[in-house]
Amino acid sequence: MDIHEYQAKEILSNFGVDVPSGALAYSPEQAAYRARELGGDKWIVKAQVHAGGRGKAGGVKLCNTENEIYQACDDLFGRKLVTHQTGPEGKGIYRVYVESAVPIDREIYLGFVLDRSSQRVMIVASSEGGMEIEDISADRPDSIVRSIVEPAVGLQEFQAREIAFQLGLEPKLVQQMVRTLQGCYAAFSDLDATMVEINPLVITGDDRVLALDAKMSFDDNALFRHPQIAELRDKSQEDPRESRAADRGLSYVGLDGNIGCIVNGAGLAMATMDTIKLAGGEPANFLDIGGGASPERVAKAFRLVLSDNNVQAILVNIFAGINRCDWVAEGVVQALKELDLDLPVVVRLAGTNVEEGQKILAKSGLPIIRATTLMEAAERVVGAWKNDLTQGTKMRAV
Ligand code: ADP
Ligand code: MG
């Protein structure tokens, strides 16, 4: 789960990371009022969306008067911000953060990520802040400092000092940098984060180390033990297809293709998507309906897959171990009858009670295309989809 910049800043500041003073606003009037409360004569108005790259996309504006703040907000509120991280549809702006503008001397990149090969938290830092880490690693790979944290002892002071020195920080700033690094690490590990990114972390003209931007993501599987974090979820920033799936306990990731996939097991779901591509099609989604899928759950999965208007054919691929093919078949029949579908559906069943499952499908009288192997299923669904396209039939009755 992702959260907003202002939320990440509040969390990090509770862990000892210094941030500029700022306040949240839900309207232009409120933003101007917040600026007056903050005082000073230069403010930054920042669109709160779950994506980076806002600065380049016009989502971060420097304002010198209350009137400018009002104008900036008037332009931002209600609009979709398209950055290189949002995809072409963009993300809606419903909140802005008003922050005191800070005189910047130096910008540093700082990230905390999970390093799969060492199975540890890795700190990635660079003296080339302000640029995206992908660009830094392409243009200035030598500037990147990497450091792995030993979980049994956490981030040690000497290790944090070493990072500060490698970034070329002046001795008088090192202690502040150590506090920042240790605060970020504590927030990361205490709250089960999967990512903390501060880009830029700045050194100000008056020698302060400040997080000017902050991004945090959390492990969904650990949210149950951090209700205060779970509360920060903002559905307006999520792909509506994925929000619906999360609310129904289904593991779904929306993609750009036309072939909807209903599969049990994450590994099989990945293999199904690969095989569809191999057969010349493009999957519309990843969907794992889980091990013990009841007919109701299968019907739910159909509804979810069909909520994506790009879906023009469906492949159901079930390998029943814990699951039962007859249950899945019942679910498919129930869903197809209920939804009155007018698009090709290919079903491949294997494993427990497969004969009963096939019988249910055959007896239903529905135009379900059956397949025995995954390759065959993928070829049939892609074939049926192409065929429908060339015939120009209406693809969807629901
Ligand atoms: P994004 O990464 O989404 O573009 P940032 O929060 O990093 O958004 O802001 C973009 C740029 O705006 C920063 O790199 C920094 O140069 C400037 N900026 C952001 N906040 C402030 C601030 N409080 N004071 C001065 N400059 C800021
Ligand atoms: Mg940034």
Image (tube, helix red, strand yellow):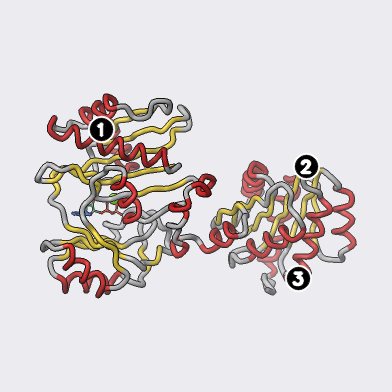
Residue 176, picture quadrant: top left
| Residue count near mark 2 (Cα–Cα under 10 Å), binned few <14, some 14–19, many ≥20 | some
Residues at marks 3 and 2, CA–CA distance in whole angstroms: 27 Å
Q: Toward the viewer: 95 or 319?
A: 95
Q: Amino acid at mark 1?
A: Ser
The residue shown at (67%, 66%) is 390
Q: Residues within 10 Å of mark 3 (few under 14, many from 20)?
A: few
Instruction: Locate residue 102, reporting x and y percent.
Output: 15, 53
Q: Which mark is residue 338?
A: 3
The amino acid marked with disc number 3 is: Glu
In front here: 316 or 72? Answer: 72
Residue that label 1 marks = 143
Q: Nearer the viewer, mark 2 or mark 1?
A: 2
User: How far apart are the alpha carbons under marks 2 and 1?
Assistant: 50 Å
The residue singled out by tag 2 in the image is: 321
Residue at x 64%, y 61% (from the top left corner):
305
Say whether mark 2 is within 8 Å of ligand 1.
Answer: no
Please state which amino acid type lies under the numbered disc 2: Gly
